Amino acid sequence: MQFLLENGFDVTVSAAETILADFRDEMRKGLAGEGTLPMLVSPFPMRQRPPRDCEVPAFDVGGTNVRSARVVFNAGGRAEIRNMLRGRMPGSQGLVDKAAFYKTLCDVLQPNIRAGETMGYCFSYPATNDGTLLFWTKGIQAPGIVGTNVVKGLTEALDAAGIPGCRMTILNDTVAALLAACTYRPDAEETCAGHVGFILGTGTNAAYGERGALISKHPGLDPEMLYPVNCESGNFTRFPRSRFDELYEAESGNGKGVWERCFSGVHLGPLGTIILREAAGAGLLSPGVSDFVRSRTFTNPELDDFCAGRTPDLFPCGADEAATLVKLIRPIYIRAARFAAVNVAAAALQAADARGAYTGTFRINIDGSTFWKTAAVPFLHLFTEQLTALLRPRSFSSRIIHIDDAPLIGAALAVN
Ligand code: BGC
């Protein structure tokens, strides 16, 4: 649509190759402790084999939900999730203080952990290896937790609840997805070029395995081993932004998560709303619809359902204007699929370099509702098309994997 182009919204992502090169440049800088990407390195090396005959408590603090379970690995190393319990992520629906935050976490976790056990703790926010929360993303409102240690906080809360002496291995959800990907065995023979854990849900991020020798900011690592790196790729900044992205940043951004704000679930609704308001300002919409789009902020599920034809009555208009609205909104989903592919390609090519691979198939474990549930466009197809365009000329291909409950399984894998 001309209006989108005029405002710098490039739905075809014509600069994909340049963005990919800049992404990789930022990743390398991050490994040296420079640039914009945190590139948080896990203290444990990657392992290719799952543990056998054991049971591990696992906890997943995600963007929308908190889940706990017992993960049982059988004699063949196959993981089974038992007694999964859920709650809402504290701070996702309004401001919470420290006490309320840990109370919700403990309520969900308590039935699945016993005194003295070691638990896998998947925490889907930027945190250091010892568990210090750097900042919240995904709009979580719990300011009292920022800068504090979420492992210490939870251990103390469990202590107070009568479950003392627990230990925790904390990891990011992308690292959990990465570890789960490493245990995946394809039916057919293929040369594995590397693994990636990618999330596109409420937020977005990627992880891959980097060679210790190439992580110059941590000289103490074993130079031969591969270590999971949580890129916190949502903080990437070197890509062309549209005027709508800039307006959204000016309205509610803080300079962090600039890439994430352009295509993850929690942001697509407000971003789409801005596009509609600007279209109204440019006289592209009827007075009734213009007033309506100015009266409220739409959520991602609302816009997605509308574009998928599930809720044709969302806007007060006839079929012709509804078609215009779809033309305005659908491009945010097309661009999201392409941005996701560029992001994954960057992590995958880093993984290949780390392994010294020049050809082969990447095993890419993807989790998240925006990736798997978006119905406005054929998301997986668009993603794969863009990814293939970036990988094939470099002699690589990809296998997209979706492992159920990857955050809990990956958390359990990190313990053993
Ligand atoms: C967080 C990451 C997380 C990603 C996907 C982002 O908002 O900063 O730590 O991996 O969302 O859940």
Image (spheres, grey):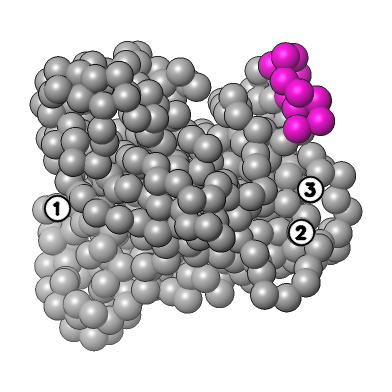
* Residue 192 numbered mark, or none: 2
Image height of 159 relative to 28, above or below: above
Q: Nearer the viewer, mark 3 or mark 1?
A: 3
Q: Which one is in front, 347 or 57?
A: 57
Q: Return the disc, 3 or 1, that comes first in the chain's sequence.
A: 1
Q: Which residues are magenta?
A: 212-225
Q: Dominant secondary structure of the magenta stretch? A: loop
- Crowding near pointer 1: few (<14 within 10 Å), some, many (20+)? few
How far apart are labels 2 and 3 at the CA level?
Answer: 9 Å
Image height of 94 relative to 85, above or below: above
- Marks 2/1 in contact by CB < 8 Å: the verdict is no
Q: Position of residue 29 (x, y in %)?
A: 71, 25
Q: Would you name the residue on which mark 3 appears? A: 352
Q: Position of residue 40 (x, y in %)?
A: 57, 27
Residue at the image point whose x is 76% and y is 23% from the top: 222
Quadrant of the image occupied by residue 143: top left
Identity of the residue furthest to the bottom in this view: 319
- Side (left or right) of 206 relative to 124: right
Q: Return the disc, 2 or 3, that comes first in the chain's sequence.
A: 2
Residue 302 within the magenta-colored segment of the rendering: no
Circle 3 SS class? helix
Image height of 402 relative to 120, above or below: below
Residue at the image point whose x is 30% and y is 56% from the top: 82
- Marks 2/3 in contact by CB < 8 Å: the verdict is no
* Residue 296 numbered mark, or none: 1
- Crowding near pointer 2: few (<14 within 10 Å), some, many (20+)? some
How far apart are labels 2 and 1 at the CA level?
Answer: 48 Å
